């Protein structure tokens, strides 16, 4: 169909490209459906197109059809609140909205022309794609907006192709692979990696609709070879393994288990490996950069690391004063900056924010902080704004303390932040969901536990107990939402 998805033009067979529950589309039918939609969008001269991104065949057809037309898709989270949705629509100004027939859309979308997406189109040969430059926008994906209204990251076709081909190299990803996942389709992880990735390789994806350990076991035991998930999903898998022998069998037989979107706690890594003999590998990316690093399928799956830079990606760690962190000691902390063809083009309508995001020589400031091990593997220790704690003259990443806390038998969930301290500058605060709310581990017990595993200066000085940690749709802990 286009250079992004050669299999759509080259494969007229009945090979299945997409499964969403009991519904499926072959490559030939996907090409016909996306091609027919692309013609309709071209006839309307659409530049940007909103997609009501439910976990459905129609969403996949809508995005591929939009790319076929040479337009840019703006995926909309169906759980977005009215204010956020209104901002995204005002900012991106889509020409129309694509949705599955029967989907009820909120009032904010009432002023847009609606096209119901037909997933199963029969008849004539699939129309060819519009000729489009590699730098043309493919997606406008809105960031989480933790420091203001969400910003629309304009992702060019070049970045999608580059990232997916680099992952294919790292993971030995081919058209023989069958991917299973239950990720949302309004985000880079579920949409770009989880749907466009298999289509670019000429393989297939089986979407669970809604994540469940039973669904994972069923699909992996029925021919799927790869699993993509977020830490919350792998935590549920780790919890379920002792009671679900079919799940153990499924993971043990998978070719590749990949976690992303946040750090997977070491404790869950170890529980899954002990039960199945298989290691989960991690990768690191952002909306603005797509994928930056990944553990390789033929390399070491080391818990707590996100691998090495992908082919074509330059990565460096930088001090606050702009000097480079060159030590590969697993301790020296710096902000990650990246440069390469995987990067976004701009923040839509925000030249100020775009300029601020890049250095003068073109490096993107990720805002993530990390260390590098002696072999160059990257370990993320948190976000610069919320996870870099300066205490007693040390720079400490919250992530390694969280991992240490999760190794305590009395801790179910943990988050670590810093708060002002007259003596230390900042003191380390642990937010803990205890296994037994009636007998939670105390500050001294957890401080000693961390000090023995890491170093005394990394021990929490304050422990606060919660019933649950605030999380977003991708399972990331929202530290700004913790009680003040």
Image (tube, rainbow, N blue to C red):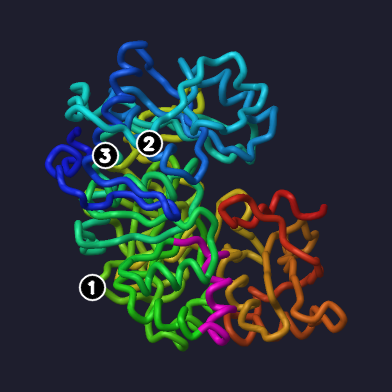
Which label number is shown at residue 176?
Answer: none
- Percent x, y for residue 436? 80, 81
SS assignment at label 3 = helix
SS assignment at label 1 = loop
Q: Residue at x 35, y 70 (%)?
A: 222
Q: CA distance from mark 3 to mark 2?
A: 8 Å
**Which quarter of the rendering shows the N terminus?**
top left
- Percent x, y for residue 425? 72, 59
What secondary structure characterizes most of the magenta part?
A: helix
Q: Residue at x 71, y 56 (%)?
A: 470
Q: CA distance from mark 2 to mark 1?
A: 37 Å
Residue at the extreme right of the image, as rendered: 438
Disc nearer the start of the sequence (2/1): 2
Crowd band around label 3 with a 10 angstrom C-alpha radius: few (<14), some (14–19), many (20+)? many
Disc nearer the start of the sequence (3/1): 3
Residue 351 visible in the current orientation: no
Q: Are marks 3 and 2 in contact (CB under 8 Å)?
A: no
Look at mark 3 in the image and give the residue it sits on: 29
Look at mark 2 in the image and give the residue it sits on: 119
Q: CA distance from mark 3 to mark 1?
A: 35 Å
Depth check: give the residue in front, 94 or 329. 94
Residue 233 highlighted magenta (yes or no): yes
Q: Are marks 3 and 1 in contact (CB under 8 Å)?
A: no
- Residue 147 relative to residue 116: left or right: right
- Percent x, y for residue 192? 37, 45
Residues in magenta, as a range: 229-244
Look at mark 1 in the image and give the residue it sits on: 298
């Amino acid at each position: 169909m286009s250079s992004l998805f050669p299999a759509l033009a080259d494969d007229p067979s009945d090979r299945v490209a997409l499964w969403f529950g009991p519904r499926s589309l072959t490559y030939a039918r996907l090409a016909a459906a996306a091609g027919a939609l692309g013609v309709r969008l071209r006839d309307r001269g659409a530049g940007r197109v909103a997609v009501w991104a439910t976990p459905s065949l129609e969403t996949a057809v809508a995005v591929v059809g939009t790319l076929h037309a040479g337009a840019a898709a703006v995926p909309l989270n169906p759980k977005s609140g009215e204010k956020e949705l209104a901002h995204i629509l005002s900012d991106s100004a889509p020409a129309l909205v694509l949705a599955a027939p029967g989907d009820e859309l909120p009032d904010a979308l009432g002023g847009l022309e609606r096209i119901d997406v037909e997933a199963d189109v029969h008849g004539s040969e699939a129309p060819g794609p519009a000729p489009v430059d590699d730098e043309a926008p493919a997606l406008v994906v809105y960031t989480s907006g933790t420091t203001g209204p969400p910003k629309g990251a304009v992702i060019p076709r070049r970045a999608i192709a580059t990232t997916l081909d680099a992952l294919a190299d790292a993971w030995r990803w081919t058209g023989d692979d069958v991917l299973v996942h239950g990720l949302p389709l309004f985000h880079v992880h579920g949409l770009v990696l989880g749907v466009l990735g298999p289509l670019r390789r000429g393989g297939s994806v089986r979407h669970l609709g809604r994540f469940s350990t039973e669904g994972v076991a069923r699909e992996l035991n029925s021919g799927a070879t790869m699993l993509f998930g977020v830490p919350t999903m792998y935590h549920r898998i780790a919890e379920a393994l002792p009671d679900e022998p079919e799940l153990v069998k499924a993971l043990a037989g998978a070719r590749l288990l990949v976690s992303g979107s946040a750090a997977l706690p070491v404790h869950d890594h170890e529980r899954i490996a002990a039960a199945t003999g298989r290691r989960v590998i991690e990768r690191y990316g952002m909306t603005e950069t797509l994928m930056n690093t990944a553990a390789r399928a033929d390399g070491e799956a080391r818990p707590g690391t996100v691998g090495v830079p992908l082919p074509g990606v330059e990565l460096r760690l930088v001090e606050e004063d702009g000097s480079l962190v060159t030590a590969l000691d697993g301790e020296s902390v710096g902000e990650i900056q990246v440069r390469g063809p995987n990067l976004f083009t701009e923040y839509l309508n925000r030249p100020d924010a775009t300029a601020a995001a890049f250095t003068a020589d073109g490096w993107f400031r990720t805002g993530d902080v990390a260390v590098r091990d002696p072999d160059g593997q990257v370990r993320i220790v948190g976000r610069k704004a919320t996870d870099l704690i300066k205490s007693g003259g040390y720079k400490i990443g919250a992530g390694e303390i969280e991992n240490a806390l999760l190794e305590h038998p009395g801790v179910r969930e943990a988050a670590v932040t810093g708060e002002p301290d007259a003596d230390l500058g900042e003191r380390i605060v642990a937010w803990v969901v205890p296994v037994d709310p009636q007998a939670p581990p105390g500050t001294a017990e957890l401080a000693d536990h961390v000090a023995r595993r890491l170093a005394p200066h990394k021990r929490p000085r304050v422990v606060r107990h919660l019933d649950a940690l605030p999380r977003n749709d991708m399972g990331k802990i929202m530290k700004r939402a913790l009680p003040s």
